[in-house]
Each structure stands twice: as structure tokens, then as C-alpha cells.
Image (cartoon, rainbow, N blue to C red):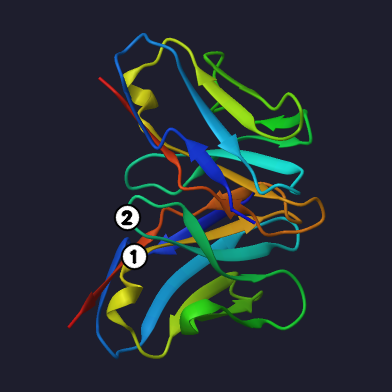
Amino acid sequence: DTGVSQDPRHKITKRGQNVTFRCDPISEHNRLYWYRQTLGQGPEFLTYFQNEAQLEKSRLLSDRFSAERPKGSFSTLEIQRTEQGDSAMYLCASSLTGEDTQYFGPGTRLTVL
Amino acid sequence: AQSVTQLGSHVSVSEGALVLLRCNYSSSVPPYLFWYVQYPNQGLQLLLKYTTGATLVKGINGFEAEFKKSETSFHLTKPSAHMSDAAEYFCAVSERGNKLVFGAGTILRVKS
């Protein structure tokens, strides 16, 4: 069990550029969650998958955001036309259906200049 | 809708003193409650959780929390603070193990 991994750990981009983050969950976990954490705040839910199906999306997830989990394993989160307000830590977590504990990755810190 | 309020964005204690971090929640269904700890530039690590059963739950690193339904509270305590406890602590609630709703966090400072 290598834990949840996220790549990259840090991303600096210019406003208007597109960025993509990757999350690899714990291998047997079928649920995968994305959260966003801004400075001084707790993480906020963005979306989650059960296997490859995206079951819930937050209203925080604007049309510029898209998440996929094509084979029910790793997931990607893409932000198009980034804005300075997108600067945040993006956290991924995974769990097993029927179990209540989510295990978090180290996060990807995005800075939009 | 569920929500969490953490009283005190910053708490400072002396090494060896009692740690008390406050958490109140709102939930329309029986809640699952969690405390996570976050060290700088790291993800969140689960300290402890309450789902059902015993209302006093013990976690890692000597922390414990008590679920009090009548007070809608889930305060985190540790009898004796250690320098290594300095971190940010988040209380969270979920509905039967689904998405987590977090409080704003409490930064714990431990003075030597």
C-alpha cells in the first residue's frame, strides 16, 4: 500500500493557461474524491467518482473544470483558462465503498500568476 | 445541509498542558464525524473518527474526542501537549461516509 499520490506537487502557470493534475488512489479503492483548499480555509468538496462514474459535482466546479477517471483507477482534474482565483491546494482522497475513512494525498499546489 | 464550526482559528498551549480544540456540527441525519491533522505542505491525516457506538473515541498520538449529540459537539482533546502536535487541525462531518464537509481549521501552537 503506497498511499494516495498526486502529480505534480506544485504548478505555477499564467492566467489563461490550461492545467491538468493527476491523482493515483490506493490500489483497491473504488471511490475517489477531489477537494480544493484555499489559504486559511478547510478543504471544500469538488467531485467524486465511484469506479469510472462521476456521481456528484459541487457547484464550485465551474464549466472550466473537468474531472475524469476513465478506467476506474487514476483520475485527472483539468482547469481550462485558469484565473487567479483558482490558486489553491487541490487534494485527492480515496476510499472503499462502505468504508467511511478517506485517505488523502499530499495535494497539488496551484499558483496562477 | 451539513456544516462544521471550529471555534478559534488559533490555539496556543504550553508543552505539557491540556489541548482542547472545539468543533460543533450541524447535520440533518446521524453524522459521521472526523478529526484530521495537516502539517505544512502535506495532505490530511486522520486522527480519529466517530460513526456509531461508543461516543468517546480514541485516536492516534494520544488524542481523543467525545461525540455529544445534545450539544452537537465533537471536541478534540489531548491531556499533555507535545511540540510535535503543532499543526492545523480540521473537524469534518459526512453523511454516512460520503463527501466530507470541513470546518475552517484550528492552528495549534505549542510553546516550550
The one nearer the camera, A101 or B77, is A101
Residue positioned 69% across, 63% down in the render: B32
Report x, y in % for residue A11. Answer: 35, 28
Give the residue number, with chain letter if any, for mark 2: B40
**Does residue A79 appear to the left or right of A39 in the view shown?**
right
Q: What label sits on residue B79 in the rendered view?
A: none
Q: Quadrant of residue B20?
A: bottom left
Residue A29 % position (x, y): 74, 48
Tag 1 secondary structure: strand
Q: Is residue B26 above or below residue B15?
A: above
Is B18 located above or below residue A74 in the figure?
below
Whether the residues at callouts 1 and 2 have beta carbons within 8 Å, the answer is yes
The image shows residue A69 at horizontal and vertical percentages of 70, 27
Numbered disc 1: what chain? Answer: B
Q: Which residue is mark 1?
A: B87
Q: Residue furthest left?
A: B112
**In the rendered image, the vertical position of residue A98 relative to residue A64, given as above or below:** below
A69 to the left or right of B75? right
Mark found first going from the N terminus, 1 or 2 = 2
Q: Residue B63's spot in the image, x, y percent?
A: 49, 81
Camera sees residue B19: yes
What kind of residue is marked 1?
A: Ala
Residue sitting at x 76%, y 49%: A28
Under mark 2, the amino acid is Pro
Label 1 and label 2: CA atoms lie apart by 7 Å
User: Could you tell me which residue is drawn at 59 percent across and 53 percent down?
Assistant: A2
* A84 left or right of B99 in image: left
Q: Is residue B1 visible?
A: no
Where, quadrant-wise, is the C terminus of chain B in this rendering? bottom left
Q: Residue at x 73, y 43 (%)?
A: A31
